[in-house]
Image (spheres, grey):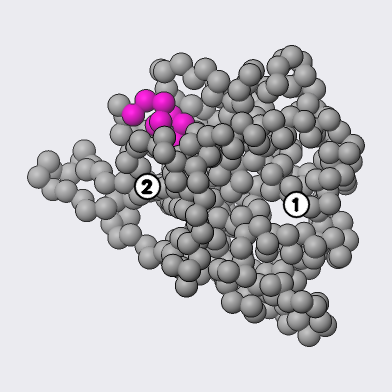
Amino acid sequence: MWRPTHTLFRKVVLPSIKENVKLGKIYFSTKSRPKSATKLTLVSASIGVLIGAGYGGYTHYKVNSKKQTTSAENNAYAFLKELPIYKPHYKVSSDTYRHDVHIVLFQYRTCPFCCKVRAYLDARGISYEIVEVDAVLRQAIKWSEYKKVPIMLQLMDSTAIISVLETYFLDTSYTLPNVIKYYPAHTLVKDGKESIEFANRYFVMSDAPVTSAKLQEEEKEWADNVLVHTLSPNVYRTAGEAIETFRWFERAGGWRQAFPFWECALMVYGGAAAMWAISKRLKKRSSLYDAAREWMAAVDAKGTAFLGGDQPNLADITVYGVLSSIEGCQAFDDLKNNTDVGKWYYNIKNAIGKNMGRVASLHAAAN
């Protein structure tokens, strides 16, 4: 499962605090390849992955062995009183963004869940900063107990993040803390595995007309539960394709500019080896084609350019975001050649591009 982060900062005064007490900055979080693949690099990367997996498995066991099998509501919205130190790698600036909410996205560039959030932010013309997270060491999110991306600090689900932001931006008469309360978090423990779920995450909570942004709950849920799970087996079919996919991740995410050479090598070759092994247990390539055809059948039934009509809605944005995570892979070219999804995909990409802000690299400032 992907492990990225998304962060949202804002000056707020909590209703529960006396009027004369102000909180300074309380925030929410949504948060080189080497030129040749030598045997030494592969072996070293594999050993690192095995050691990390072993340690992770051990600590997971130690933590869960002390827990009861329960489902309990968390106090997921306790505000953090200290701003974590972070160094943004990119900044997206939109001239049309008029809100005072400062958004920082901690991400893995090609994580489909992070791509969903980024597609939403760009479609809505929101300004934000990006921190690229090392998928192996995750130093950029060491301040967070939750180690998956994207997160809005307390909000740790890409779908919930989008719904919270959409609800807030549609009607800013509500404070962001009050909006977040519509999406309570619960910790679920099943078969010894703990996960956090957010109620109402597929719903926009607003009395305002949603128009082109009308939430298509079933389609968004389909993207999360069906489409996402067809990606991995289609971009890691062979060891060679897995390495090439991670090399594209490296280029797309600017890893060489953000991380040391050895970290890039570990992420590329260690990550490729791990994902190739995992993909053997997953769905076949044809399932991705079937999912794309199912989606296009729903769009064609509407008789419009997008499922949302003449403009993409949140379901369009979600599906586009998921598919954009493999745009640089051979599997994406095969998908376009075997389905009709290409025209829809580039139409929505162009539509989002018209609203997206200017991207500036901050790598020099981050180093």
- Residue 138 falls left or right of residue 319: left
Placement of 306 over or under 256, stated as above or below = above
Q: Quadrant of residue 19?
A: top left
Q: What SS does tag 1 mark? A: loop
Q: Residue furthest bottom?
A: 40
Q: What SS does tag 2 mark? A: strand
- Check disc 1 and report the residue beneath it: 328
Q: Quadrant of residue 289?
A: top right
Q: Residue furthest left?
A: 20
- Check disc 2 and report the residue beneath it: 102
Residue 170 among magenta residues? yes
* Amino acid at the residue labelled 1: Gly
> Of residues 77 and 9, which is closer to you in this image?
9
What span is in magenta? 164-172
Image location of residue 41, percent across then percent down: 76, 81
* Amino acid at the residue labelled 2: His
In which quadrant is the N terminus drawn? bottom right
